[in-house]
Amino acid sequence: MDLSTPLGDEVLALRAGDRVSLSGTIYTARDEAHRRMHEEGIPFDPKGAAIYHCGPVIRDRTVIAAGPTTSARMNTCSTFLIDAGVKALIGKGGMGREVAEHLFGRGVYLAFTGGCAALAASRMQLKGVDFEDLGMAEAVWAIELDHLPLVVGIDSHGGDLFDRVMRRASMRFRTMRHPKPE
Amino acid sequence: MAETADAALFEAIAGATAKAIRRAEIEMPPDVLTRLRCAAASETSEVARQELQNIFANIEEAERRQIPICQDTGVMVVYLTIPPDIPFSGRLGDAVAEGVARATGEVPLRPNVVDPIARHNTGTNTGQGMPVVHVLPGDQITVTVLPKGAGSENVSRTAMLLPSQQAEIPRFVAETMLLAGGKPCPPVVLGVGIGSTFDGVAALAKEALLQPIDAMDPFEQLICDAVNCLEIGPMGLGGTTTALAVKVKKADCHTASLPVAVNVQCWACRRATEIVEVP
């Protein structure tokens, strides 16, 4: 499914495990940016916005590398963004129960492949920046996306692909016998 | 004369180190590509196939634009071989460090090295005890670099098993991946050290990652199958490919010990070797 920002209620139809491609403006944010936005306000229109957990490498106003960072670090500082109207969080590794519950009926978490910094950069054009004083990795960069391939990790119905996979892995580990060479 | 020769050798080692780092960061080793292709061919989950396609596209893009495969360009673990006629001194390590600092500016690499408590970044990927340099005897001078990212390093584990717990080894490796989940950016390569001592076994596990991964012996295959039956899949999104390969390296140990270590490596199993031409 092709999605573009600003996102609307079309994201509510998505289910964990669906593959989507995202175009339009997204905003990068890591730990420091979340803190600043919480204290001073969100520097862009959050209605239907998508946040990308990423500390990009920018050189000469060009995105050189922009792979996803571990989203779980933002577990405790993301709900205010969803309250403000943000419809999609993008990153790697999934997010905690509190965020998953907050997304219920409101938005989705989209997973991008860890380490794929060059691929991401090839689909990006830099549009602007806020909080540049936080440094390159922590600033909020506005980036125009052209069809980034993503997977719905957490949907707005309580579906969580990461959680499902790890529950199954746990069960399989418990029933694993001592493997022995033949 | 001796000083000139020393300066030329220093420069040759620094240059070869920087060159090996550049290659490791930008080009995927052929054996890793082979294993990724095998995984993509046998993977049944649509989501997992998409993740692997993204990885292939990323590897191509990095090579085309001559930029690092991943933004976590790691910390440098360096293996140096030295022939008998080269005098062993601290200058060898200094030359490697010079190569690391040079590559940090030239490739460029992300400066990742910090003081462990103050967290002050040195800016050059060098510092006290960094890069990690292992010196081994050899026929010629070679520099092998293994840039190690934090996501996978952070979920690595060591255990001092009982000598009677040999059969526990595959389960311990599988448990390591169960605890890690999607955090180390699977599909992973697992370096497993068995034997030696508490400190030695971790070094064995890391050295195991230097071996080509396009072949596994029956024991390695057995551990790999145990890990893959968890179906954690690429990025923890599910699928049959959790580990691309398991490589084991052993050493003898105390009769009362069975040290085991698992060094987890993300899909970007980066490494490169350069031969140093002695000036």
Image (spheres, helix red, strand yellow):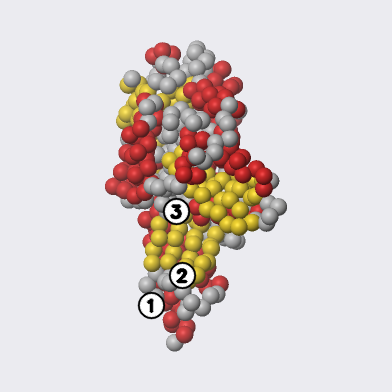
Residue at the farthest front position: A182
Query: Marks 1 and 3: which is nearer the front?
Result: 3
Kindly identify which residue carries mark 2. B138
Q: Nearer the viewer, residue B32 or A45?
A: B32
Q: Nearer the viewer, residue B77 or B94?
A: B77
* Crowding at mark 2 (Cα within 10 Å: few <14, some 14-19, many 20+): few
- Disc 2 sits on a residue from what chain? B
Q: Quadrant of residue B56?
A: top left
State the CA–CA distance, disc 2 to disc 3.
Answer: 17 Å
Q: In x, y percent, where is residue B179?
A: 59, 34
Q: Amino acid at mark 1?
A: Pro
Q: Quadrant of residue B58?
A: top left
Q: Which mark is residue B211?
A: 3
- Disc 3 sits on a residue from what chain? B
Q: Amino acid at mark 3?
A: Gln
Asked whether residue B168 is in view, the answer is: yes
Kindly identify which residue carries mark 1. B279
Q: In x, y percent, where is residue A157?
A: 49, 13
